[in-house]
Amino acid sequence: MWGVALSVVIALVVVKISLWLYRWANPNCSGKLPPGSMGFPVIGETVEFFKPYSFDEIPPFVKKRMSKHGGSLFRTSILGSKTIVSTDPEVNFEILKQDNRGFIMSYPEALVRIFGKDNLFFKQGKDFHRYMRQIALQLLGPECLKQRFIQKIDLATREHLKSVSFQGVLDVKDTSGRLILEQMIQMIISNIKPETKSKLIESFRDFSFDLVRSPFDPSFWNALYNGLMARRNVMKMIKRMFKERREEATSHELKYGDFMETMIYEVEKEGDTVNEERSVELILSLLIASYETTSTMTALTVKFVAENPKVLMELKREHETILQNKADKESGVTWKEYRSMMKFTHMVINESLRLGSLSPAMFRKAVRYTIPAGWIVLVVPSLVHYDPQIYEQPCEFNPWRWEGKELLSGSKTFMAFGGGARLCAGAEFARLQMAIFLHHLVTTYDFSLIDKSYIIRAPLLRFSKPIRITISENPLSSSHQYANLF
């Protein structure tokens, strides 16, 4: 009797588990699903998605499934979320164009739980994101950079390179990252005390930006803990300064004219679109984005230039011409020079951005169309950057491939800064920072790579070794010769 009952219970459990597994592998939905596999229950195909691969390789996770399922769309499960992956440039462009309409920015629930649902990155709403982007452009947009910051960026870059070049060895990512942080903090909080700025920079540099990796990686949780602790410390410092500024403000009249004052003014407006918490989150987000991505791309660009003498020679020629045409050799880079006289420099930057593809994938959520509502859509625009039908010999660093092409905006085949309504608000700042860094590096210094550093993706870029260069002032440079006259 008991044996029969136990057999029935076991049979029911097996049926229940089998039904659960079937439903996991064949999700029920009202929309149309592409072919694919949901992987193991709960974890899905997360482990394979985060598996490291070489720099110039199409993501094996994507390549394998495109080949297996015979198309550029497939379904999967990543970080516990039902996901449709798109590698088709036309589809990706349409998805990004439909931001806040057919699709909204969204992330896997696992990430939301880790970083908190109140994090600025996870906020929804068409008007909210448009509003926050407009505010960000007041700091990083072309007009503001042109009118207020290009000369400051130029001077800071020149002085920073001069101060570190005496060491003879320069870690490019570390050097450019510190430079970017110092400039951004000054642009945001112009009255910050030097000791407070130094403390903020050091706290900020304790961040681990290598969190976009598999949660099954043994080092993930330690990096996550350190990153969250550093984030909390930085948030406390910014929040304290924001509160002090609000208490100090007695009217809407501009006193400092910096970005923090702009945010305080927005908080004091009627309505609840922007509050103090969101303002602090935005400031932190701008610092994170500008620091990590721009410093990584600057290091990658210097690596490519140092490895390609022909490219370095052409860069030197272009920037020496700019110096020779100046009446005042000590005057900084002008907006006209940056926009109109650095054609090859922009070609170099674009080629580095194409190969770097720092945004290998972007998460969206479908709210209508034939894709099931509620599913995460993973847009993978970076594959088009390595498409041999679009870019001949795509793994080769070749700035001349940009000859005659649009250099300062994106397209369906070049999405280094995203696309649609979510086109990166800091794109112009990143380009400007890289261009000015290259200008002073190639016109004033001789440099060469110290170590061979290999690059992997997991899925973000990681250097096997820091990009370090030997650096010394070039006695034949125009700036050096001019300085020696006095």
Image: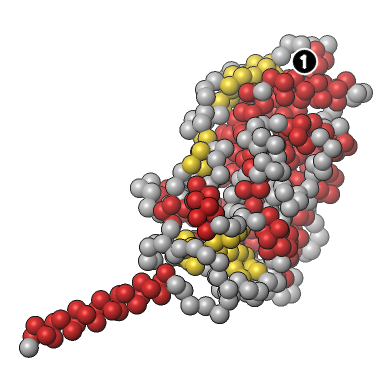
Q: Can residue 426 be seen in this view?
A: no
Say which quarter of the image contains residue 70: bottom right
Residue displayed at 13% across by 86% down: 5
Where residue 143 appears, x then y in whole percent? Answer: 84, 49
| Lateral position of residue 254 relative to residue 110, left or right | right
Q: Can you say whether 376 is above or below 424 in the image?
A: below
Residue displayed at 53% across by 52% down: 67
Where residue 111 appears, x then y in whole percent? Answer: 49, 61
Where residue 210 appears, x then y in whole percent? Answer: 49, 46
Q: Can you say whether 468 is above or below 429 in the image?
A: above
User: Relative to the observer, which residue lies in front, 309 or 173?
Assistant: 309
Secondary structure under tag 1 reads loop
Give the residue at mark 1: 477
User: Which quadrant of the figure contains the C terminus?
Assistant: top right
User: Relative to the observer, which residue lies in front, 216 or 467?
Assistant: 216
User: Relative to the observer, which residue lies in front, 139 or 172?
Assistant: 172
Say which quarter of the image contains residue 173: top right
User: Which quadrant of the figure contains the N terminus?
Assistant: bottom left
Q: Can residue 82 be seen in this view?
A: yes
Q: Can you say whether 362 is above or below 336 in the image?
A: below
Task: Inspect the image, locate mark 1, and give the three-letter code of the amino acid beneath it.
Answer: Ser
Mark 1 residue crowding within 10 angstroms, few (<14) / some (14–19) / many (20+) = some
| Lateral position of residue 305 relative to residue 331, left or right | left
Where residue 436 appears, x then y in whole percent? Answer: 75, 33
Q: Which colour scheme is used?
A: secondary structure
